[in-house]
Image: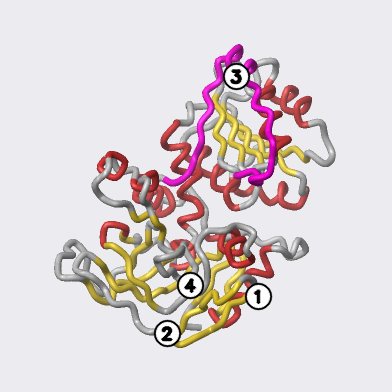
Amino acid sequence: MKAAVWTDYGKLEIKDVPMPQIGEDEVLLRVRAAGVCITDLHVYTGQFIYGRPPHILGHEICAEIVDMGSRVTGFTPGQRVVVETSIGCGHCAFCKSGQRHLCENMTEIGFTPNNGGYAQYLKAPAGNLFPVPDEISDAEAAILESVVCPAGALMRWGVRFGETVVVYGVGPAGLAFLQTAKALGAGRIIAVARNRRRLERSLKFGADEIISSAEENVSERIRELTGDEGPGLICEATGAPKIIEEIFDIARKGGRIICYGLPPDSAQIHFPVSTMIMKQLEVYGAVGNPLVWEPLMQLIAAGRINLKDMVTHTFPLDHIEDAFKLLTDKSADPIKAVVDPWA
């Protein structure tokens, strides 16, 4: 089969590699589309050390079932599925409670030692697969993983009906926060970012108001829009240390903050504990959520969340390095790209 093999930092090679061999609890999958994630770019370049080459990356995957292990039930060959990437030990308290992404021995599909979706075929545990409704296209399903974490955070911590939500960042994660907050009953949603063009684009993904941090005083503008109370919920999707420090002052008393954007490992962030205490803030960290895939797909299938317009570019697998270059091209301004292993 054909695969894009990460052979060294900054280097991918299209190679013919052996077909995966499945175990009794695994499924052989034919990849229909794979999303291109900024994390893969950072791993590929060595900016983020998460496994080492050689390896097949790709953790945003839509595929169809080709073959099944002897103990697999509930699926049929030809069925389209999405792949939840966290593989837990299956025995610890986290795995047993449905939180395998927090397992101490967790590994991930797409990262060493589990080959990913930048290939024509891959294998995955049957318990990591979710059927894709007919209303969702291959490309939409391929980027679903990028929406799961933000959407899962909001489904876990809740959006109060009619409340004001502020989302920092309007990349894929920010757009996921915007859309899910709207779908879950938020009132006014305010998007904050530097890039005016991206902000304008966010209006069709759920933003009611936009604030350019390059042009306006964000704190003052939010105060104008929300009054003295401030927003009930803030979603931080940039990882910028300065923003992480500022949002505690912007949040209303008794408000909630979801921290999703990862700051650089070298960053030193002043965490305003006194402000958090005196304003009685609830602060959450958000990562994966294996339990959100099916309800999220129901929202997408019903047209409540728009993934179609988030897929802005498609590449054949042979041109996957062009897809990586696109992520750093500010003039192109992509949202999400997908690769087709069969094009």
* Amino acid type, label 4: His
What distance separates the C-alpha of mark 2 from that of mark 4?
Answer: 11 Å
Q: Residue furthest bottom?
A: 16
Q: Which residue is mark 1?
A: 322
- The answer to whether residue 11 is above or below residue 265 is below
**Residue 23, percent from left and from top:** 23, 70
The mark lying in front, picked from 3 and 4, is 4
Which is more foreground, mark 1 or mark 2?
2
50 vs 294, nearest the viewer: 50
Q: Amino acid at mark 3?
A: Met
Percent across and percent down for residue 60 are 47, 62
Q: Which residues are magenta?
A: 262-288
Magenta run includes residue 88: no
**Residue at mark 4:** 55
C-alpha separation, residue under disc 1 versus residue under disc 3: 44 Å
The dot on residue 276 is 3
Which of the 4 image quarters holds residue 279? top right
Decide which of 318, 94 is in the foreground and name it. 94
* Badge 2: residue crowd in 10 Å (few <14, some 14–19, many ≥20): few
Give the residue displayed 28% in from the left and 77% down from the top. 21
Which residue in the structure is indicated by mark 2?
A: 17
Element carrying mark 3: helix
Q: Give the mark nearer the N terminus: 2 vs 4.
A: 2
- Main secondary structure type of the part rendered in magenta: loop
Q: Position of residue 188 (x, y in %)?
A: 61, 31
Mark 3 or mark 4, which has the lower sequence index? 4
Can residue 125 be seen at all in this image of the molecule? yes
